[in-house]
Amino acid sequence: MRRLSRRKALSLVKELDAFPKVSDSYVETSTSGGTDVGADILDLAETMITSGGLQYEPVVFELTPKQREWQSTLHRIQNRLREEHALQEVLYKSLLKGAPTALPPREAVFMQSPDACRIHGDIYVNKVAGNLHITVGKPIHHPQGHAHIAAFVSHESYNFSHRIDRLCFGEEIPGIINPLDGTEKITYDNNQMYQYFITVVPTKLKTYKITADTHQFSVTERERVINHTAGSHGVSGIFFKYDTSSLMVTVSEQHMPLWQFLVRLCGIIGGIYSTTGECRAFLHLHVF
């Protein structure tokens, strides 16, 4: 076996790179330094679902007085639903007429330079567990998995304070308030991670007003600061980890037939007459 010279061996070691690099074709040079935010979905089968159905819109994060009033009304409804769970059934039957289901537009007098990004739209997903995440950098595909280009983004240039106006699964039902609607999180730390663990329950809705196949969901929230020095590892961003329940809930509305109502009414009237007669006979026998 031939041996390499010491000089050639040293040269090979210097050229050896054990860390995979991102191809230059994935990098797009921009004047802002790559401060884009990426949102996409990765399901249980590690299938990345395109976020083409999402739209990115520059907006002002601070709400106007009219929008803040809408937000407060939504919070009051959410608090009442958490305290009185039976109201959810009433909600499905009445569809909550006049409910604050859309954020009012910003008035022209409050217009200013955008300082945030609004992400909205619809995405079709597989009925398996998945992860919708919003983090720094555009998502890319590569043989070793899924990644976001965020190496050139300064930590001081982003903040994951967010507001969820509406989040639903399946067909949207007007007037229905979902658990995360109106959620607002404010942070002053740039490396904040927000996690929402969602369990989705398929729901068949059959009422006299509407018939639809939709989904309810419950959610557990968790948040922490990413600090690798202190042992808190991870990626800063907003993560919605969802899974579908194997059970299905059917919400139906039933009314008493007219004939049954009349029979019960006659029974009540007959009972009143009978009781009145017995009381009259008792008083006549013992008093008079």
Image: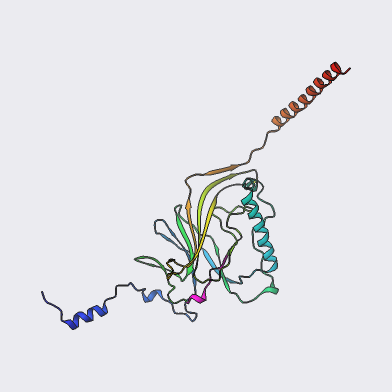
Residue 112: which quarter of the image?
bottom right
Q: Quadrant of the N terminus?
A: bottom left
Residue 6: which quarter of the image?
bottom left
Farthest residue to the left: give it: 1
Relative vertical location of residue 254 with respect to residue 128 in this rendering, above or below: above
Relative vertical location of residue 219 with respect to residue 56 in this rendering, above or below: above
User: Could you tell me how many numbered marks the image carries?
Assistant: 0
Residue 30: horizontal and vertical position, in percent? Answer: 47, 80
Farthest residue to the top: give it: 285
- The way the protein has been coloured in the rendering is rainbow
Is residue 59 on the magenta stretch? Answer: no
Residue 214: horizontal and vertical position, in percent? Answer: 55, 50
Q: Closer to the camera, 195 or 252? A: 195
Farthest residue to the bottom: give it: 7
Q: Quadrant of the C terminus?
A: top right
Q: Residue at 83% across / 18% down in the picture?
A: 281
Q: Closer to the camera, 107 or 116? A: 116
Residue 238: horizontal and vertical position, in percent? Answer: 50, 64
Image position of 113 (left or right of 18): right
Relative vertical location of residue 79 with respect to residue 39 in this rendering, above or below: above
**Magenta span:** 154-162
Q: Closer to the camera, 91 or 141? A: 91
Is residue 156 on the magenta stretch? Answer: yes
Q: Residue at 57% across / 57% down in the picture?
A: 180
Image position of 3 (left or right of 262): left
Farthest residue to the right: give it: 288
Residue 239: horizontal and vertical position, in percent? Answer: 49, 62
Q: Residue at 65% across / 43% down in the picture?
A: 208
